[in-house]
Amino acid sequence: MKSVCMFVWNHFTNDARVLRECSALAEAGYEVDLIALQDPKNPSLPKEEMRPEGFRVIRVKRQPSILVNGMKMASQVKKWIFAKKTRKIGAGLVGAGLVILAPLTMIGLGAAAGAILLPPVRKQIVNASAMLEMVFTSTKKSYDFYHANDLNTLPQALIAGKIVNKGKIVYDSHEVQTDRTGYGYIQSNLEGWLLPYVDSMMVENHTRAAHNEELYGFYPYVLHNYPFYRPLDFTLRKDLHALLDLPKDEKILLYQGGIQAGRGLEQLILAVKDFKEGTLVMIGDGKLKPVIKQMIEDEGVSDRVKMIDKVPVEALPYYTMNAYLGFQVLNNVCFNHYSASSNKLFEYLMAEVPVVSCDFPEIERVVAGNDVGVVVDSHDPKSIAEGVNRLLDDLALYARVKENTKTAREQYNWDLEKEALLNVYTNVVERKLPIMKDGAPKPAQQ
């Protein structure tokens, strides 16, 4: 039995793509261990578990005990330094003539405490320690494949799979690492430095594969973000109307996913006033959530917008079923957003929910190409509102796109797409080349 060590830089609670990949490999007979991160805010999350899909999850500490204790000590030092009683003690020491060593002592304590307490420094220390924990865990045994999900786990896979052990490195880039929000010079260039040591690479669509070819001279494999195929069992549907105290005939206009910058959420809130009917429901969490909550209050639309915390990925489809339409309105803040074809688009279609979407190439190809919704200018609240109102007013249009989602869900699903993943694993052993969209083989990386 071939074995796979997979890495993911999260707690593995809502990562749909990684769940699908691990499930498909386990189903195909691979022994799969997924190394993820522990969540200090969720102590009930098991440190190790055998998933019902047939793979094992191992969560490693993000903050080693020595680091946590050091931070606590530094925090106490900080409080002590700035406490009133400390100033009194200091004055007494001056009077006693014992302050000769005080400046040197304080400089040393300040430097040590400052290095730990400064958020950027602390973050890098924590990340470095988590990476080491992943490496230590992954080298306890030897695997045939080391599968890195995104750039922030590629170094761990390379150390474990090329330096310590000898295995094939599969790099699954969920994002465009060279042009995404929050990445600086080092992160944007790290991928290019590490790729010569990778045996095979996957990206989520052909726009990104073509971009990769321009950057690095090879065309990676494509693995789309299609959801598990599931029958629509409305007996399992989570009743959002009851949960949110909405009238049973109220139309739910759904956004599901991260509450993050660049997702078009500010424009969506501004558009709400012009929706002729319906309630905007937002399911998810993220750094932008406090900003969006305040914006809802400032715009006076709190009666028309409801927010729900993120739900487990396995349960999400039963929330999605409630929607009249779904939003995928990314903003063009970077090539990573512009080239996206993210999970939520296909999750809407799997639930037979028409989509109001941005006009970016991969997303428009699905929405307009399959006539499953309307395409709008996601940077313009008026355009978003017009798209929503078209689907509210034109019942013939809505009936047509709703019917077309039934065909789309038969095409854009993981039952078909998982074969592409299994082919990557077969081909990396046989050193076969990836295939372009038109069927022509392209040179693989050396």
Image (cartoon, grey):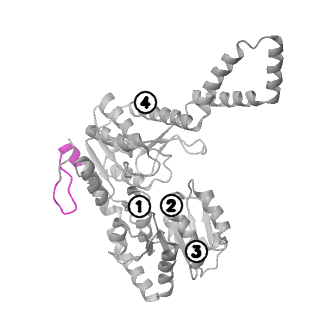
* CA distance separating discs 3 and 1: 23 Å
Can residue 113 be seen from the camera position used here? yes
Q: Which amino acid does label 4 sit on?
A: Phe
**What residue is disc 2 on?**
257
Locate residue 220, reporting x and y percent: 26, 51
**In the rendered image, the vertical position of residue 134 relative to residue 259, given as above or below:** above
Query: Is 368 displayed left or right of 299 in the figure?
Result: left
Image point (58%, 38%), residue name: 119
**What residue is disc 3 on?**
272
* CA distance separating discs 2 and 4: 33 Å
Q: Which numbered disc, 3 or 4, marks the residue closer to the eye?
A: 3
Locate residue 338, reporting x and y percent: 38, 61
Q: Which amino acid does label 2 sit on?
A: Gly
Locate residue 272, reporting x and y percent: 58, 74
Give the mark, 1 or 4, whose residue is nearer the N terminus.
4
Q: Is mark 4 on a helix, strand or loop?
A: helix
Give the mark, 3 or 1, whose residue is nearer the N terminus.
3
Give the mark, 2 or 4, whose residue is nearer the N terminus.
4
**What residue is disc 1 on?**
342
Q: What element carries label 3?
A: helix
Give the mark, 3 or 2, whose residue is nearer the N terminus.
2
- Disc on res. 136: 4
Give the mark, 3 or 4, whose residue is nearer the N terminus.
4
Query: Is 239 displayed left or right of 88 in the figure?
Result: left
Look at the numbered discs 3 and 1 and tell me whether their residues touch, using CB distance below 8 Å.
no
Query: Is 78 displayed left or right of 409 in the figure?
Result: right
Give the mark, 1 or 2, whose residue is nearer the N terminus.
2
Q: Nearer the viewer, residue 259 or 99?
A: 99
Q: Which amino acid does label 1 sit on?
A: Ser
Q: Which numbered disc, 3 or 1, marks the residue closer to the eye?
A: 3
Extent of the magenta region = 426-441
